[in-house]
Image: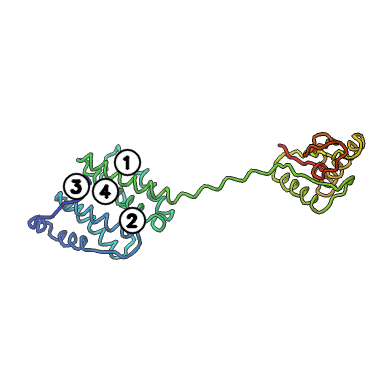
Amino acid sequence: MLSRITGYVLAGAAALALGGCASSFKDAQMAEATGSDFQMGLLEGYKKLADMEAAEADWNDARVFSNRALAVAGGADVMPENPSARALPADMELAVEIAQARLQTILDGGGREKAGQATAMAQVGFDCWLQELEENIQPGDIANCKAMFDQGATVAEATLRPAPAPAPKPVDKGPWEVYFAWNSTAIDGAAQQEINKAYTSFGKLKDAMVMVIGHTDTSGSSGYNQKLSERRANTVYEVLTLDLLIPEDRITVNAMGEDSPAVRTGDNVREALNRRVVIRLSN
């Protein structure tokens, strides 16, 4: 049937043989719809099925599909055909049941409104498939109708499928640089902001550990700078534990003195970028 989509013309004598069906067939072929994409798709689909069944002299099914087309044109809510209305091969009952459930899910999920043309194709293809299964004499037509259903259903399902949630942004693990004035351990506003950033990320990571590492520049003696870097690291440690209430066992503290500078300098050089505490997270 579907392999002969175009080119069918009813002969006058055949039309007369239709009797009452001829009238409904002609009315259906002339019917128009101005509704949604779904309604337009159903109308054109059922008109085409009626045309092809009439061309095969299957007057009963031509009448069924013509009446469906007229119902759609009249604004009725035309549902898919119930498989129980057809005498279907027993070995196809499960496949039909699965397809019916698939189509109903699309309809219940807003397919008419959100994927009108594809949903209409799925419904027309389903009804066509049932009709061809009942006849069970044209394997090619059975396959073509099922393919129509599958194509429409697949497109509708893809349209209705929720967009995947965006992947969560990775939590920043630092490093954050907390800078100090020369020979100072005081936390200023900018330093507090960096500590707060580390704290915010810490709250997003389960079982995270905080590493606090103190540094100095090369001005002053090496021994003094080692002690100064320890005091700076401990200052940041106290803010994290006493003010921000991070458990003590989640923080490790180290001091590098004037070793591992951010900027390489000679001895006894004041370099602001080296007077720092580095905070990193691990988990």
Pointers 3 and 2 in contact (C-beta within 8 Å): no
- Spatial CA distance of label 4 from label 1 is 15 Å
Residue on which the image places disc 2: 79
Q: Amino acid at mark 4?
A: Cys
Q: Which residue is mark 4?
A: 128
Colour setup of the view: rainbow
Q: Position of residue 268 (x, y in %)?
A: 88, 38
Mark nearer the viewer, 4 or 2: 4
Q: Secondary structure at mark 4?
A: helix
Q: What residue does disc 3 label?
A: 4
Contact, mark 2 vs mark 1 (Cβ under 8 Å): no
Residue 179 against residue 24 in the figure, above or below: above
Q: Label 3 vs label 4: CA separation?
A: 14 Å
What is the distance, in whole Å, between disc 2 and disc 1 at their CAs?
19 Å
User: Where's residue 221, x and y in %?
Assistant: 92, 36
> Mark 4 or mark 1, which is nearer to you?
4
Query: Do the residues bearing badges 3 and 4 touch, measured as CB atoms within 8 Å?
Result: no
Give the residue type at disc 2.
Answer: Met
Is 236 above or below relative to 34? above
Closer to the chain start, of discs 3 and 1, is 3
**SS for tag 3?**
helix
